[in-house]
Amino acid sequence: MRIVRYQAGDGPAVYGWVNSASVESLMVGPLEGSPFSEYRRGEAAIPLEAVHLLPPVLPSKIVCVGRNYADHAREHGAEVPELPLLFLKPPSSLIGPFEAIILPAQSQQVEHEAELGVVIGRRGRRVQPDEALAYVLGYTIANDVTARDLQRRDGQWTRGKGFDTFCPLGPWIETNFDPADTLLTCHVNDEMRQMASTRDMVFTVKQLVAFVSSVMTLEPGDVLLTGTPAGVGLLVDGDQVKITIEGLGELANPVRAEKVS
């Protein structure tokens, strides 16, 4: 099932589901209850293009994994870590599909990072790898936007990863998805920048959920970003970023320069 958060007109933000059975148009219906507990699906009667899609979840934390593709580590002259390299992005960095990535005036080198996102479905601490997928609600597409010059200058990653709009997420959470071997691509305008399979990840989804939960309690709705392959590159004002993951759809966002008064 595809789970979304959306607004219809001036209405409140609500969870919903997407009926993909129609070949003519995707339709949206409300979820009565919570996707993290009990819910009932209402009639899917609204065309998807008629609603405003929001980030599909509101996490308490966004846990990210650095250098989880060996080719990405090598393109930055870095070693592949022996254990998952963790960092956090603030929830305030979230934006949804079609919302603009804002290039901050503090940085001259903002780059895209296409990633598979994992949405946690239930509370977990010290989860074993063979049980890890039972704690996952579903999967989504993410862009770990990074101010590379600030990341290098600061020596730690909070500022370079944490600006508002630096975590596009969506368009939905797919609950029926196998993360083991699926194609991920990123285009900027008409140029392909990144292409890899999730099988190339150093640490699998199962291993990452287990490792992160050995450090911190995972809460329903938390998001885990699983790393990016080689090919990250510069974003400039006017660009359009489109990330596609086979079986999940696509996440598109325009890029705009920050307006400083």
Image: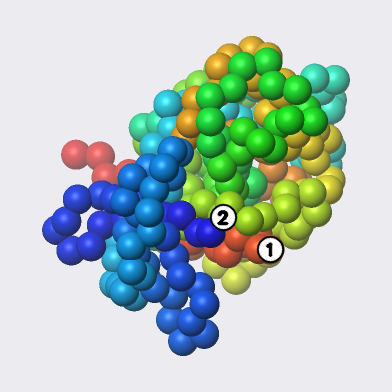
User: Which residue position holds label 2?
Assistant: 174
Q: Is residue 74 left or right of residue 170?
A: right
Q: Is residue 18 left or right of residue 206?
A: left
Which residue: 75% across, 59% down? 183
Q: Nearer the viewer, mark 2 or mark 1?
A: 2
Badge 1: residue crowd in 10 Å (few <14, some 14–19, many ≥20): some
The percent position of residue 105, horizontal first and vertical second, equals: 37, 36
Disc 2 element: strand
Q: Are marks 2 and 1 in contact (CB under 8 Å)?
A: no
Residue 239 drawn above or below residue 77? below
Q: Is residue 115 left or right of residue 240?
A: right
Q: Which mark is residue 3?
A: none
Q: Earlier in the sequence, mark 2 or mark 1?
A: 2
Q: Nearer the viewer, residue 248 or 176?
A: 176
Which residue: 33% across, 45% down? 33
Q: Is residue 100 visible?
A: no
Q: Is residue 226 visible?
A: yes
* Image quarter of the C terminus: top left
Disc 1 element: loop
The percent position of residue 91, horizontal first and vertical second, equals: 40, 31
User: Which residue position holds label 1?
Assistant: 246
The percent position of residue 73, horizontal first and vertical second, equals: 79, 34
Q: Nearer the viewer, residue 194 or 27?
A: 27
Badge 2: residue crowd in 10 Å (few <14, some 14–19, many ≥20): many
Amino acid type, callout 2: Glu
Going by the picture, which residue comes out furthest to the left?
10
Which residue: 53% across, 30% down? 122
Which residue: 23% across, 62% down? 8
Real-space CA distance between mark 2 and mark 1, rounded to the nearest whole angstrom:
11 Å
Residue 202 drawn above or below residue 158? below
Amino acid type, callout 1: Glu
Q: Is residue 54 left or right of residue 73?
A: left
